[in-house]
Amino acid sequence: RISWNSPGYPSRHELLESKKAMDTMSEVKAKSETKAAPAKRYPGKPLQVIAVKETGADKKGREVSVNEESLKEIINNLRKTGCKKMSIVSLVGAMRTGKSFMLDLFLRYLTEPEENVAKDPEAIFNGPNLKHEQDSQFYFRAGAERTTVGIWIYSTPFVRTIKGTKVAVILMDTQGLFDPHAPPEVNNAIFGLSVLLSSYQILNVSKQIQQNTLSELDLFIQFAHRAMEVWKMDDVKTGEKGDDLGSHKFQYLQFLIRDWGHYKKTATVEENIESSKNVLDNALNTTYNDKGKADRIKGSFDNMSVFCLPHPGFAAEEEEWQGEFSDLRPIFRKMTGAYLRKVFDETLVVKRDVVTGKDLEPDTLGYQILSFTDVFREGKLPKSMDFFSAMKKANLLEAKAKALKSYKKLMDTEAGPGATYIKEKQLKKLEDQAIAEAEKKFKSIAAFGEDERKEAWSDIVVQMQEEFKRYKDANKNRIDKILSGFTTLALCALVAFILDMASDYTCDWWLDACVAGSRLAKYFYTIVACVIGYKTFMLYNEEGQMVMLKALGGLWAETVKEGTEIYEQVVLFFSNFRLDECRESVLFLIP
């Protein structure tokens, strides 16, 4: 036999100390490796939600479609924020005018700690360059090649506060307007979708506001107004009061003029902003051949503004530029910091439903993207009636979804997962209340023709009937759990009964303490039996014999199950106790 104290062999104490030292070294190494890993700045990545695909043998056709997997991920991330409101900031403009570069700066501002940018908006230019975590950004790149096709949305929303309310901010990037690879109809369609979906629409233009940009904007505004007129006519046909077109204005339009060359280096931010405040008014001045364009644009948005940014520096235009902030001109950094503060801390607006005028919710956004994209699928502006049909579809889908959600929410309070059995009459009463709430919710959202609403409500009723069958079946399956609340009492009463019976033959005839304990046990299990008997009697009167028998069977099964679990735990405890005793004895014998 080899002893722990034999020559050449370490003692048990030495082995334990060596193991502790090795564990300590492993922990230190793991911590150092963890500290060495750079922190990830960006929480998500851009996802293509709306794609523009080439069709036909000659590749001249275009088809606009939705990537539903990406859309689902974005909607789920919106729900995770817990925000009931959102703001959608969209940047659209001509090809290679720095849209994606600007959106990457948006990302830096939104991921920078708020206390840092509150002190100094230029804090976003500290730290790694734009090449850092490039896959998590909108992919800026110098040169003439396009990098964005369709509409991309950042996967993770950013929570900001607007007028004291937490709001989820979504960033959206679009294919550049006037892209030589795409026909004009596609540009119009993308532009139209962007204005429809956003609450804060930024038009990215170079050096000045061009008339062709205003014409594109006016084209879509005229189209949208025609769609609203169709809506109004439909309301008149159904005998309902039509809404004013003014109540369907778009929300915020901002012209972001890039490479502005009229700022003074020595001027303050406020002085530079003041010097450019008349740019928008000058661009929208009515001319002899205006044909009402300027007035239509000004009357179609709740708010309009302009902001001018100077040229970032010629290094940023070079093919090899790596996104180093030190290459950017100081005046560009200064004005960009002020611009980002203005957008995200001063003028951000909550997204409003273009159909109902109420604040848009995450689920509704998904319905609208699917419906609006469907009518733009051919890559051009659809007819007003087609767009009106899309608005109807989105509105009714939202109304149906929220009505069903309201129904399930109320039903779940008493008959959902984790609930106990409730009486048939009580379940039916609960269903009537849930249907009334669902109908109220549906009517508050559905905004289109009487026939469409009747048809949609009929579909909802059918779905609610199917849901009620599932609730009813689940409730029946809970019958054997009706008396489960008495399981522990029943088990204790059963043990007391067995001990009372055993004491009659073991100690009652010679020990007074045993007689007293037996009397207490009898009182206990008699009271428990009376309580369970009364509950069973009431159950028989209200629900019938079958329910009563099934509930008693369930109580017996639960009692046996709980008793078996306790017995196994006791056996395991004593088994481990004996094993510990044996182990101590063996260790005591080892020299």
Image (cartoon, grey):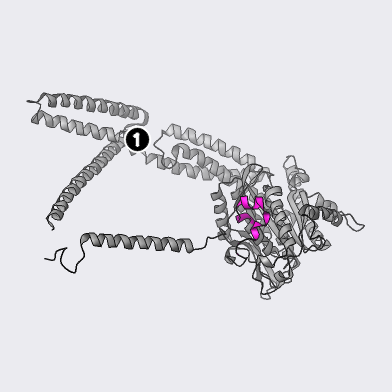
Secondary structure character of the magenta stretch overall: helix
Question: Is 246 drawn above or below residue 157 in the view shown?
Answer: above
Q: Which residues are magenta?
A: 109-130
Towards the viewer: 201 or 108: 108
Q: Position of residue 346 (x, y in %)?
A: 70, 48
Q: Position of residue 522 (x, y in %)?
A: 19, 26
Image quadrant holding the C terminus, namely: bottom left
Q: Is residue 277 left or right of residue 401?
A: right
Going by the numbered disc 1, the residue's amino acid type is: Ile
Q: Quadrant of residue 98?
A: bottom right
Towards the viewer: 196 or 425: 196
Q: Position of residue 561 (x, y in %)?
A: 26, 42
Q: Is residue 359 left or right of residue 503?
A: right
The residue indicated by pointer 1 is 482
Element class at badge 1: loop
- Is residue 251 at all visible to an observer of this figure? yes
Towards the viewer: 442 or 133: 133
Q: Quadrant of residue 134?
A: bottom right
